[in-house]
Image: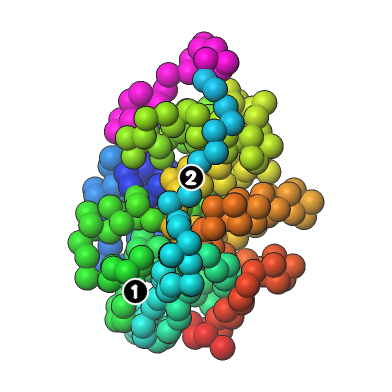
Amino acid sequence: MPPEVVSPLTLALTTCQDNFCSVNFFRRSSTQPSSRWIPYAALILSPKTKIFEGSDPELFETGSKIESQNNKDFMNRVVLSAEKLTKVVPSNDGDIVILDGIDLEINAGESVAVVGASGSGKTTLLGLLASLDSPSRGKVFLAGEEITNMDEESRADLRGKHVGFVFQSFQLLSSLTALENVMLPGELKGESNPAEEAKFLLARVGLENRHNHYPKQLSGGEQQRVALARAFASKPTILFADEPTGNLDTVTGQKVIDRLFDLNEEFATTLVLVTHDDRLALRCDRIIELIAGRIV
Ligand SMILES: Nc1ncnc2c1ncn2[C@@H]1O[C@H](COP(=O)(O)OP(=O)(O)O)[C@@H](O)[C@H]1O
Ligand SMILES: [Mg+2]
């Protein structure tokens, strides 16, 4: 089994193992870098993260509130927009149009649900908006910058500064404890005390007693709450979540969603959420429905 590797600055810390790789899910176009481009291990980039083995958790103080990088001036500005966004992939039976001329604008602090039948293009749209994938045509502007013309390195940099991601399948690093997983974005950003922030965030998702548990020692709902804490630890301008309750039962999913909306409000994060769950969609400020790659 090869070591876990992650895309370095996708602060959602996508894990990639052997031939199965969630990154492949997004890296589905010929315009995307091959797997050779994603060998950087966050664990290697951040060797100090693994410092808790046998250490006393009390050494680290909790409770310091993280200051959001989103200030009031930023609110009510468009932080994410797409112009005529189109994704076409070749196939043996001719080109498949996955997204067909999507135009949208999302303001800072807004929460937007993307809904639609399976196969309607929701995940593809999220991947393009989060700069994990490149469109065939059209443009994406994220935090004032057009990302569609950037090279992968610049996009990774922009993602590191502005984007958080929560996946249906949690995507925690199995060799790190809950606390270490949440510390990792801060470590990668070179923050002075990522443990303090991580502890604060774990407390906010109700996992203050699970610092030293590994993902496999946690339930699905607990793992997703760790993933939420980790996503907010990168202090994203925009949080993308792709069916974050998709692997959870209704009651557990509800708890995760409550935490998600609490944190989103607290940090004034912009939220773009893909969901099949009507109740969840209705909690967002706005709903965008996709049918066959078009907004209706
Ligand atoms: N690389 C690809 N090649 C061919 N078809 C693809 C590729 N990527 C996605 N698709 C197809 O595009 C459609 C939209 O996919 P997706 O964005 O994952 O939909 P959703 O998230 O709404 O279920 C699906 O029919 C899917 O099979
Ligand atoms: Mg999907």
Q: Residue 140 shows which numbered tag?
A: 1
User: In percent of the image, x 22 and y 54: which residue is there?
Assistant: 153
Say if 172 sits above or below 289 in the image: above
The amino acid type found where label 1 is placed reads Val
Query: Residue 148 appears in which quarter of the rendering?
Result: bottom left
Residue 69, x across and y down, in percent = 43, 51
User: Is disc 1 placed on a helix, strand or loop?
Assistant: strand
Q: Quadrant of the N terminus?
A: top left
Q: Position of residue 243 (x, y in %)?
A: 60, 60
Quarter occupied by residue 100:
bottom left
Residue span colored magenta: 43-59
Q: Amino acid at mark 2?
A: Glu
- What is the total number of numbered labels drawn onto the structure image? 2
Residue matched to label 2 = 67
Q: Where, by quadrant of the figure, is residue 30 drawn?
A: bottom left
Residue 57 magenta-highlighted = yes
Disc 2 on helix, strand or loop?
loop
Q: Residue at x 62, y 43 (%)?
A: 225
Q: Is residue 293 above or below residue 281?
A: below
Residue sitting nearer the eye, 196 or 8? 196
**Residue nearest the observer in this picture, 3 or 234:** 234
Q: Is residue 283 left or right of residue 50?
A: right
Q: Is residue 181 magenta?
A: no
Q: Is mark 2 within 8 Å of ligand 2?
A: no
The residue depicted at 52 percent of the width and 15 percent of the height is 59
Q: Is the CB of mark 1 within 8 Å of ligand 1?
A: no
